[in-house]
Amino acid sequence: MLTVEADAVAVERRLRAGQVVCPACSGVLRPWGFARSRRLRTRWSSRVVRPRRGRCERCGRSQVLLPVTVLVRRADEVEVVGSALAARAAGAGAGRIARALGRARSTVRGWLTRFAYRAELVRRLFGQARAGVAPARVLPVPAGSPRAEAAAATVAAGVAIARRWGWDVLTVSPWRVSCAVTGGRLLSPDRAGLPINTSPPWPSPL
């Protein structure tokens, strides 16, 4: 899996120009068909996405190019999941969040549980990412719990990164930026920890 910008036309152009790098060996990815279609749920509706696939000229591995709006193995847009994480950090319970979003309680509980499991790691790594782009700025005030502090660090890093690279913070959510920084793996079940790129380049969240 490789996270790329949301603009499918731009992704196609870069793929055909040999500008997409293989995450396994740093070789060049070339067009290699498409992954299976999937339905991605937004806040109020849903849409079908069919991610592009690229194959490396050097190592021969293929990679699914997921747009930056999509988290690995999640059926909801990252902004939907992020809103649930923020609501939980503010004190809302899983049932209340599920009703507000129109999602199954078990689905929301799964997001919250995974985020809580990684809370300290998320807080530390996103703190590093934020410090890397805005070292002179004051760090977020502790939010009172590991989960709340992790959510605060994620949002603060997303805002700092967006401002640093000139992305409109009123248009680009910090949760989408977090998806770019983690390669879509913010809530993935990776046992090795949370893969996070604390320095640019990141895929554009636009």
Image (cartoon, rainbow, N blue to C red):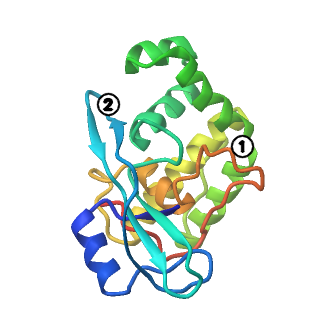
| Direction from residue 167 to residue 194 in the image, left or right | right
Density class for disc 2 (Cα within 10 Å; few <14, some 14-19, many ≥20) is some
| Image quarter of residue 168 | bottom left
Q: Residue furthest right?
A: 192
* Camera-side residue of 143 and 157: 157
Please state which amino acid type lies under the numbered disc 1.
Arg
Which residue matches tag 2? 43
* Residue 171 to residue 198: above or below: above
Q: Is residue 138 above or below residue 14?
A: above
Q: Assess disc 1: are there few (<14), some (14-19) or many (≥20) residues with their C-alpha within 10 Å of its C-alpha.
A: some
Could you say where residue 122 lies in the image, as x and y percent from the top left? 67, 50
Report helix, strand or loop for mark 2: loop
Disc 1: which residue = 118
Report the amino acid beneath label 2. Arg
> For the residues marked 1 and 2, what is the alpha-carbon distance in whole angstroms?
25 Å
In this rendering, position of residue 15 left or right of residue 141:
left
Picture coordinates of residue 43 (x, y %)? Answer: 32, 30
* Residue located at (67% from left, 42% from top): 142
The single residue placed furthest to the left in the displayed view is 9
Residue 143 in view: no
Considering depth in this image, is 181 or 138 the residue closer to the camera?
181
Q: Helix or strand or loop: what does disc 1 sit on?
A: loop
In which image quadrant can residue 162 be found?
bottom left
